[in-house]
Image (cartoon, grey):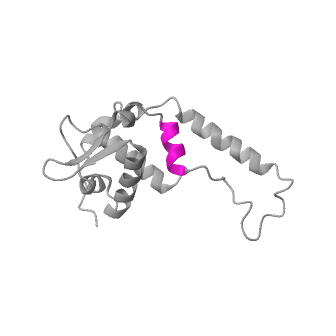
């Protein structure tokens, strides 16, 4: 799993435990996760495009999970964030000489699908259940760049 996906999941988890009416900013999420603002901003943009969260501008604005964001499968979300790429790059330049007869590629693809399938039954709510949720609520980071 890429760092981008990990950061997006952690951002969703932090937003999932926000108090009713609490709208966090991208900067606040970045500070809580102790990661650069620009990295979180990219993840937030992708999550908005997926319909997982909404961003409101102006006074009283901020980030909030949508209903989809609360009930979506973690497996679905990881698939969407990771894309449908291959685990190994068999068709690079130069291409792998084994690509026509390789069994590894299929085995890795099956393992990848098993990874996603293990995440399919989970929702964001499952991820933020105790003891994780209270820790997320208490996260206060140093100002991110």
Q: Quadrant of the C terminus?
A: bottom left
Residue 138 on image: x %, y %? 24, 43
Q: In the image as oriented, which residue stretches furthest toward the left?
A: 59
Quadrant of residue 26 within the rendered picture: bottom left
23 shown above or below 70: below
Q: In the image as oriented, which residue stretches furthest toward the bottom?
A: 94
- Tell me where the magenta segment starts and ends, as one range: 74-82
Instruction: Residue at 47% x, 51% y: name it.
Output: 5
Instruction: Residue at 66% x, 53% y: name it.
Output: 86
Magenta span: helix, strand or loop, mainly?
helix
Quadrant of residue 67 within the rendered picture: top left
Residue 22 on image: x %, y %? 19, 41
Instruction: Residue at 35% x, 57% y: name it.
Output: 40
Instruction: Residue at 45% x, 50% y: name it.
Output: 6
Is residue 78 part of the magenta span, yes or no? yes
Is residue 6 part of the magenta span, yes or no? no
Q: Is residue 128 left or right of residue 79?
A: left
Q: In the image as oriented, which residue stretches furthest toward the right?
A: 101
Residue 45 on image: x %, y %? 37, 54
Residue 51 on image: x %, y %? 39, 42
In this orientation, which residue lies closer to the viewer: 46 or 104? 46
Q: Is residue 135 left or right of residue 96?
A: left
Across the whole image, how many numbered discs are drawn on residues? 0
């Amino acid at each position: 799993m890429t760092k981008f996906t990990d950061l997006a999941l952690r951002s969703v988890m932090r937003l999932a435990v926000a108090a009713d009416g609490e709208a966090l900013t991208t900067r606040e999420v970045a500070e809580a996760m102790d990661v650069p603002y620009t990295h979180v901003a990219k993840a937030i943009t992708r999550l908005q495009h997926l319909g997982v969260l909404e961003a409101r501008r102006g006074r009283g604005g901020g980030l909030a999970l949508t209903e989809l964001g609360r009930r979506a499968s973690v497996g679905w979300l990881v698939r969407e964030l990771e894309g449908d790429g291959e685990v190994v790059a068999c068709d690079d330049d130069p291409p792998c000489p084994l690509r026509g007869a390789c069994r590894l590629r299929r085995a890795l693809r099956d393992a990848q699908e098993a990874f996603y399938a293990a995440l399919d039954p989970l929702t964001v709510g499952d991820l933020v259940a105790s003891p994780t949720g209270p820790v997320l609520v208490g996260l206060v980071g140093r100002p991110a760049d």
